[in-house]
Image: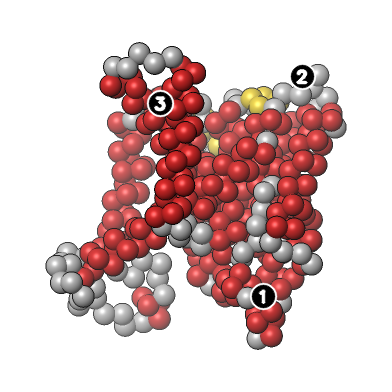
């Protein structure tokens, strides 16, 4: 009975079209942001920030970008890790070849380079779909992995193939400690998530969803499939490229092409599927599931005092993790976001049955 919109009247188009039309949702989001920006930096340890929260935020951002392409536009992609690599290496090259370039400009330019590459590999989507498109994007993964391994220009002729970032500064402030890196990443995630949410609610998002549901009918009513598909690839690749630059600069600090291999692409695809296709908040649920569940599974034997060898714990972790994925897909094919949506609807009518 506390989650109702009784008495909440919308007297303007702006009030009717806001992202969170229910007052309780707006209050909850403000509380969540206050906890994220104030509470977590004050209470969280360096280990929690570096090992869990920063990877969770960056992978959530990458999942948001992939969800735009797969969940909202219906274009399957298995090359997300490659687009993250393009963003990371492009941002690093801009900083190396143009000393003094601001960190923010490097990251955004890395996302812009990922946009160009994503649109180039998205052109086949104009002719093919489904499994064939997945194979085309898989080819992008293999080609980009090969390029960063075999073309020394991209690594500034490093003999080992590894690249490292120098000390980071943003707006004249250092980005060195775990708290500074966490807040820096959190700002990116909040801004890009709001941007993605507004895009999918607007005319462009409606075009993407029309193409996803039935592209022939969408073309009949005047939607241009080429424009809709390529813009989905462009926006998705830009967000994924920014996430890749953050992953390399903030989380890793030093990396090689294997940091963005095919397993990264599958990991992000699992996040989108488990969290919920066509849901921005589902991207965060999927990232939380992928990041936090293995941590919890690896800690259970220690909490129970079971003297299991490390290799056995890893195998059990993979088995249980895979079983949980299968269970969630069977129990709710629409992902964790659908479970949250059902819970919200039940709260709106509680304590009445209908």
- Res 348 quadrant in image: bottom left
| Res 160 label | 2
Q: Is residue 119 visible?
A: no
- Nearer the observer: mark 1 or 2; the answer is 1
x, y percentage for residue 354?
A: 21, 75
Of 353 and 239, nearer the camera is: 353
Label 1: which residue? 215
Residue at 58%, 53% (x, y): give it.
65
| Res 89 label | none
Q: Is residue 175 left or right of residue 29?
A: right
Circle 1: element type: helix
Of 157 and 342, nearer the camera is: 342
- Nearer the observer: mark 3 or 2; the answer is 3
Mark 1 and mark 3: Cα distance apart in space: 44 Å
**Does 121 appear above or below 207?**
above
Mark 1 and mark 2: Cα distance apart in space: 46 Å
Residue at 36%, 82% (x, y): give it.
12
Say whether disc 1 or disc 3 marks the residue closer to the N-terminus.
1
| Res 298 label | 3
- Res 150 quadrant in image: top right
Question: Looking at the image, do the residues carrying marks 1 and 3 touch, with CB atoms under 8 Å apart?
Answer: no
Say whether disc 1 or disc 2 marks the residue closer to the N-terminus.
2
- Res 209 quadrant in image: bottom right
Residue at 55%, 37% (x, y): give it.
170
Viewport quadrant of the N terminus: bottom left
Question: Looking at the image, do the residues carrying marks 1 and 2 touch, with CB atoms under 8 Å apart?
Answer: no
Of 67 and 97, nearer the camera is: 67
Q: Is residue 323 visible?
A: yes
Say whether disc 3 or disc 2 marks the residue closer to the N-terminus.
2
């Amino acid at each position: 009975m506390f989650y109702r919109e009784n008495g909440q009247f919308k007297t303007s188009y702006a009030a009717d079209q806001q992202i969170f039309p229910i007052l309780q949702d707006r209050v909850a989001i403000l509380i969540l942001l206050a906890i994220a920006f104030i509470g977590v930096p004050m209470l969280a340890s360096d280990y929690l920030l570096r090992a869990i929260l920063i990877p969770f935020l960056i992978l959530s951002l990458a999942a948001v970008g992939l969800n735009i392409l797969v969940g909202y536009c219906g274009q399957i992609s298995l090359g997300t890790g490659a687009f993250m690599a393009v963003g990371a290496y492009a941002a690093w090259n801009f900083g190396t070849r143009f000393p003094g370039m601001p960190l923010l400009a490097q990251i955004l330019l890395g996302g812009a380079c990922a946009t160009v590459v994503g649109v180039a590999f998205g052109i086949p989507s104009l002719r093919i779909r489904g499994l064939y498109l997945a194979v085309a994007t898989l080819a992008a993964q293999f080609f980009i992995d090969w390029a960063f391994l075999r073309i020394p220009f991209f690594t500034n002729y490093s003999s080992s193939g590894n690249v490292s970032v120098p000390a980071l500064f943003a707006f004249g402030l250092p980005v060195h400690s775990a708290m500074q890196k966490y807040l820096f990443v959190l700002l990116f995630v909040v801004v890009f998530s709001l941007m993605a949410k507004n895009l999918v609610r607007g005319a462009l998002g409606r075009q993407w969803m029309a193409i996803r549901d039935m592209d022939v009918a969408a073309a009949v009513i005047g939607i241009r499939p080429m424009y809709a598909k390529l813009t989905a690839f462009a926006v998705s690749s830009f967000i994924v490229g920014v996430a890749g630059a953050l992953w390399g600069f903030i989380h890793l600090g030093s990396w090689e092409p294997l940091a963005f291999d095919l397993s990264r692409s599958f990991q992000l695809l699992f996040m989108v599927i488990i969290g919920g296709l066509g849901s921005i908040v589902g991207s965060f649920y999927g990232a939380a599931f992928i990041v936090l569940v293995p941590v919890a599974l690896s800690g259970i034997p220690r909490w129970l005092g079971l003297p299991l060898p490390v290799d056995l714990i890893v195998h059990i972790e993979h088995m249980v993790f895979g079983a949980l994925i299968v269970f969630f897909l069977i129990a709710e094919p629409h992902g964790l976001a659908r479970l949250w949506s059902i819970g919200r609807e039940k709260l709106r009518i509680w304590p009445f049955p209908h």
